[in-house]
Image (tube, rainbow, N blue to C red):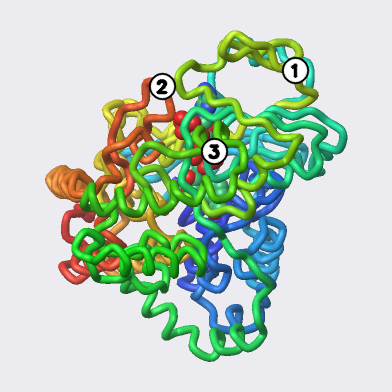
Amino acid sequence: MSIDFDAVIIGAGFGGMYMLHRLRQKGFTARVFEAGKGVGGTWYWNRYPGARCDVESVQYSYQFSSELEQEWEWSERYATQPELLRYANHVADRFDLRRDMRFETRVARATFDEAASIWKVETERTGASGTAGSVTARFVITAMGCLSSPNTPKIPGLEEFKGPTYHTGNWPHEGVDFTGKTVGVIGTGSSAIQSIPVIAEQAKHLTVFQRTANYTVPAHNRPLDPDYVRQVKANYPEMRRRAKTKPAGIDFTINPASAVETPEEERNRQFQERWDYGGLGFMASFSDLLLNDDSNKFAADFVRAKIGEVVKDPETAAALVPKNIIGCKRLCVDTGYWATFNRPNVTLVDISDEPIERITANGLRAKGRDYTFDCLVLATGFDAMTGALLKVDFRGRGGVSLKERWNEGPKTYLGLTVVGFPNLFMITGPGSPSVLTNMLPSIEQHVDFIADCLEALRRKGKTVIEAEPQAQEAWVGHVGDVSNITLRSTCSSWYVGANIPGKPRVFMPYIGGLPAYIQACEKVVANGYEGFALA
Ligand code: N01
């Protein structure tokens, strides 16, 4: 049987783009299928007002090409969505990626033919330029992102609302002008916390429905100083090397001290220093914030106290105070979020004790009261980590579906492969550090692993690679064991699938840190792809 491509890659975000580039460099043929009209993945879909990355731009960028690193100019400390999308398009042009990509084409099904050891990949159109058809490939590589399947909660009456409803994770490309409109926002996660201050500036009135108050730290975003950029560009390899030694793959200094063992004055000084600097590094103020309840409480109390300093109305301030563990749900990074609630055109409705009753034709009903809006914004997140993967009907050995295989939660070997699904690789799959790290270095590490693996198979004259059951069990056990050490696995977050009714509760990402993970992968390779069966 003839094979159309060495590999089919699903998704043209940062993972799919680099995967294509690496495979081409190694002389493999590949075809990328992308449901959207263009490249960029997350940054293609999430066009809500205020969207920007909360990892600093000089770190949230590819490192595989020093020319690319040197020529691209980031304008701000944290890149906006439009700038990140420009960057993705620049990469696609610079490395001539588009000729092997098919847009507006969604992979619906992928079936492994055991006799021939090839995948049959079936596609459907999502737009006029798309292709419905089927191709064959030796390998299938998913690059669909971890937060790419938007979650629309099943609130009764959602379809009855007469005005437009927008989801932050699938925002209209032409943008939305909220000028003079009354707007309701459901959700207070990262997407909401970024968009609320911007929507509030436009809207006639904005009402925010908050189920769980969230921790947020200031971004202190600013234009990048040219001297700083020169310094980064002169030392990029060293900065990237340092980042890889940090659990999150981000080059910031972790204070090795314990918060409980540090005297109060010094502890608060440390917190304040990180607070003034801004960003996710706040959680690196001490090494035990996610390991020790008391340490965590010090950090939580520090942030809680800030709310009252900003928000003038005591009732609103009290409602905004998070009650859970800081950093358990993903920490948010904001620009003027709390201050937005001082505006006369913004109202907070705390629905922590009573869910929204229903969406109505003109708005919604909550806590026995009717609210009316011109537009509704769902900032309600994603079916994280497994949502996009399970939208594709993957069929492995014996016709078994991935959905069936994962009905008790995802199980993978290294977050890269699944027993019974030979020659299927997942970039930043469940069981890998992925969402707990800076995505770009994690993506590059996975892509390099997969590309090197395909090359090794070719060299050895092998055509099939599959995880061995005992290796997968051991990895799943290890992922579970390390997750139990931290406080992060203890709350109802999307990390454990708690935001999707009926989803199995499993802590999905690998929390052992990027350095330990890289070491584990390197050991597997050094031992001749230990834990994999090659044929
Ligand atoms: O989604 P979320 P997100 N009724 O799941 C609420 C990354 N990201 O899109 O907490 C009422 O965090 C839900 O309430 P609760 C980042 O990793 C990064 O904001 O479940 N409310 C919550 O408040 C982030 O963590 C960046 O009680 C309902 C909100 O909706 C991840 O993406 C920017 C509800 C969802 O929050 C997801 O963030 C944006 C219901 N029925 C996102 N259902 C940056 O890099 C849900 N909610 C900056």
Name the secondary structure under disc 1.
Answer: strand
Q: Of the residues under marks 2 and 1, which one precedes in the sequence? A: 1
Image location of residue 323, percent across then percent down: 38, 36
Residue 14 vs 408, above or below: the answer is below
Image location of residue 379, percent across then percent down: 60, 35
Return the residue nearer the eye: 90 or 255: 255
Q: Which mark is residue 266?
A: none
Q: Which mark is residue 372?
A: 1
Left or right: where 353 falls relative to 234: left
Return the residue nearer the eye: 202 or 21: 202
Image location of residue 485, percent across then percent down: 18, 49
Q: CA distance from mark 1 to mark 3?
A: 24 Å
Q: CA distance from mark 3 to mark 2?
A: 30 Å
**In the rendered image, which residue does mark 2 sit on?**
501
Residue 410 appears in which quarter of the rendering? top left
| Residue 156 in sight in this render | yes
